[in-house]
Image: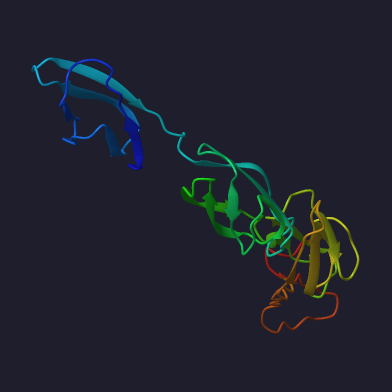
Amino acid sequence: SSDGSAIITITEGEGPFVIKWPDNQNTLEGINLKRGAYNVLVTDVHDCTVIQPVLVDAPDALQLNVTNKTIPSCNAFCDGQITLAATGGVGNYVYEWNNKTVAAQDQLCAGIYPVIIKDGNGCTLTKDVALEQPAAISLTLVKATLPTCKDGCDGSLEITASGGNSGYQYTWATGGNTNLKSNTCPGEYRAMVTDVKGCTGEGIFTLSNTPPLPLNLGGGVTLCVGQTYTLDAGAQWTS
C-alpha cells in the first residue's frame, strides 16, 4: 500500500532549505509512500546540495495457506475439515469465513469457501479455498451371461463399482457377496456396494431370458412298416 511515511533530519548547512522527494514532495516528512528506497535532494541557501537516501520498510504481503484439509468421507456428506494459517502482515490475524472467525473448522460440506484475512493493521486478503469430495458410488454391469436354455438358472451377472473410496464390498438382495452373481435365473436383481469408509451405492440389473430355439421337423412323411426316417432339427441341435 501507499500509506507509508518518512522524516529526514538536517544537521548541517544553512537554511532555508529546499527539499525535493522523487515524487516532488517538498517537506521534511514524505507521506503516502510505498515500500522502497527514495533519494531525497536537500539544497541549502548557499546552493549546497546533498542527496539523502531514505528506506521505507513495510510488512510482507499477506498470504493464506491451507495447513490441513480433510475431504468429506462420502459424496454429499458434511464431515470435512479445513485448517488455515496466515503469514505476512503484522500478525494478530482475524479469519472470516463460513460465518465464523476461526482458523480451523469441521463439519464442512464440499464447496468453495471465500476467506477474508485481516491483520493488526487492518490490511486484508481475500482468497477462495476449495474442499473437494469423493465421487458418488455407482454400479455398472460388466457382463450378463444368459442361461443355457430358456427359463434356465445357470446364467450370471457381473458388475463393478466406481467412485467413493475403493475397497468395495458387494451384496446382492437375493444372496451373494461378490461382484459376480452366478447360477442365476432370468429376472431383476438388486445389488448394493459399500466402500472402505462405509459409503454406499446400489443398482438394479436385469438378466434376460434365453430365447426358445426354433424346431423345424419339415413336412409330413408317410412310412411303411419297417421303414425309418431321420429328422433334421437344424445345426443348433446335436444328437
Q: Position of residue 63 (x, y in %)?
A: 51, 40
Q: Is residue 221 left or right of residue 54?
A: right
Between 22 and 157, the residue placed more toward the observer is 22
Quadrant position of the C terminus in the picture: bottom right
Q: Position of residue 19 (x, y in %)?
A: 18, 29
Name the residue at 25% across, 19% down.
Answer: 52
Between 239 and 170, the residue placed more toward the observer is 170
Q: Position of residue 168 (x, y in %)?
A: 79, 52
In the displayed orientation, state which residue is furthest to the left. 47
Q: Position of residue 186 (x, y in %)?
A: 79, 73
Name the residue at 70% across, 84% down.
Answer: 220
Question: Is residue 180 visible from the viewing direction of this image?
Answer: yes
Total of numbered circles in the picture? 0
Quadrant position of the N terminus in the picture: top left
Q: Quadrant of residue 194?
A: bottom right
Name the residue at 72% across, 82% down.
Answer: 221
Name the residue at 79% across, 54% down.
Answer: 195
Q: Quadrant of residue 72?
A: bottom right
Q: Is residue 101 left or right of residue 149?
A: left
Q: Is residue 127 left or right of residue 78?
A: left
Between 33 and 19, the residue placed more toward the observer is 19
The answer to whether residue 4 is above or below residue 138 is above
The answer to whether residue 174 is above or below residue 143 is below
Question: Is residue 149 visible from the viewing direction of this image?
Answer: no
